[in-house]
Image (spheres, rainbow, N blue to C red):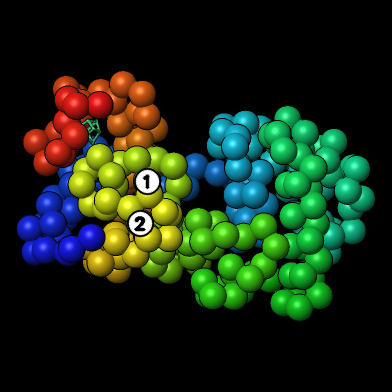
């Protein structure tokens, strides 16, 4: 998508208003360190953050290190995370990731995107989430809300998450990538719903090409 000064100005205005609307916008997966966040992120696939947050306190109490996660038998972990759905694949990815972290990285998560995306169970979305919410680095987190809003707001005409990420990186200043990501998700969860977005009460309706059309 062609980046223009007008597009950049409109994006800045959208972000300013959404920051005002959602001053607390941030990661909604409970965690207290990068390892907990990545495990919660794996569990959040096809599952609500709310449900993940019900399951993780017991897990985080039991599994403190990457080696703890890696050591647990597949069947035990599957039982513990069953209510989040897709528990077979999730347990497999969590154990495989933990094993690599324990074996190659001293139990710690690497802090760069290129290395993160080589790890089991970590795609660009999770890698960017880690950069932003665990390491305080810039990242664009393209989840389903981000995709929908970026498209409705006319900031991308792409459907592929990687291309959307690069479109937005060209429009939003790097220092705002994290804030932008969280603002999009918050707005998508609270107003710009997939079905029946609540345009009349939307703080950016005058800046949105899709206002009243969805
Ligand atoms: S005006 Fe409507 S479609 Fe546009 S961002 Fe707001 S809620 Fe979403």
Q: Position of residue 157 (x, y in %)?
A: 27, 51
Residue 182: mark? none
- Relative height, residue 101 to residue 76 (above, below): below
Observer-nearest residue: 62 or 183?
183
Q: Quadrant of residue 179?
A: bottom left
Say if disc 2 is inside 8 Å of ligand 1. no
Ligand 1: image quarter: top left
- Relative height, residue 21 to residue 137 (above, below): above
Which residue is rendered at x = 9% and y = 36% of the image?
206
In three-dimensional space, the C-alpha distance between marks 1 and 2, rounded to whole angstroms, equals: 7 Å
Q: Position of residue 195 (x, y in %)?
A: 36, 23
Tell me, yes or no, if residue 16 can be seen here.
no
Q: Are marks 1 and 2 in contact (CB under 8 Å)?
A: yes
Which residue is rendered at x = 84% and y = 60% of the image?
70
Tell me, yes or no, if residue 192 can be seen here.
yes
Which residue is rendered at x = 18% and y = 53% of the image?
11
Residue 147: mark? 1
Q: Quadrant of residue 115?
A: bottom right
- Relative height, residue 41 to residue 116 (above, below): above
* Element on which disc 2 rests: helix
The N terminus lies in quadrant:
bottom left
Q: Position of residue 66 (x, y in %)?
A: 77, 63
Task: Work out whether mark 1 precedes mark 2 in sequence or the reverse, and give the earlier one.
Answer: 1
Q: Which residue is mark 2?
A: 164
């Amino acid at each position: 998508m062609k980046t223009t000064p007008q597009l950049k100005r409109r994006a800045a205005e959208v972000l300013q208003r959404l920051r005002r609307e959602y001053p607390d916008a941030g990661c909604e997966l409970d965690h207290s360190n990068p390892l907990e966040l990545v495990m919660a992120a794996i569990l959040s696939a096809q599952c609500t953050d709310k449900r993940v947050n019900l399951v993780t306190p017991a897990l985080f109490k039991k599994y403190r290190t990457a080696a703890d996660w890696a050591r647990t038998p597949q069947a035990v972990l599957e039982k513990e995370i069953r209510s989040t759905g897709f528990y077979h694949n999730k347990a497999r990815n969590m154990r495989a990731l933990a094993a690599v972290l324990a074996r190659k990285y001293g139990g710690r998560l690497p802090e760069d995107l290129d290395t993160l995306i080589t790890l089991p169970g970590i795609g660009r979305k999770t890698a960017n989430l880690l950069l932003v919410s665990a390491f305080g680095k810039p990242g664009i987190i393209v989840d389903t809300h981000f995709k929908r809003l970026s498209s409705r707001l006319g900031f991308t005409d792409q459907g592929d998450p990687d291309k959307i990420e690069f479109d937005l990186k060209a429009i939003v200043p790097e220092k705002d990538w994290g804030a932008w990501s969280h603002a999009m998700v918050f707005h998508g969860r609270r107003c710009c719903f997939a079905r029946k977005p609540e345009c009349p009460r939307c703080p950016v309706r005058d800046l949105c090409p899709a206002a009243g059309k969805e």
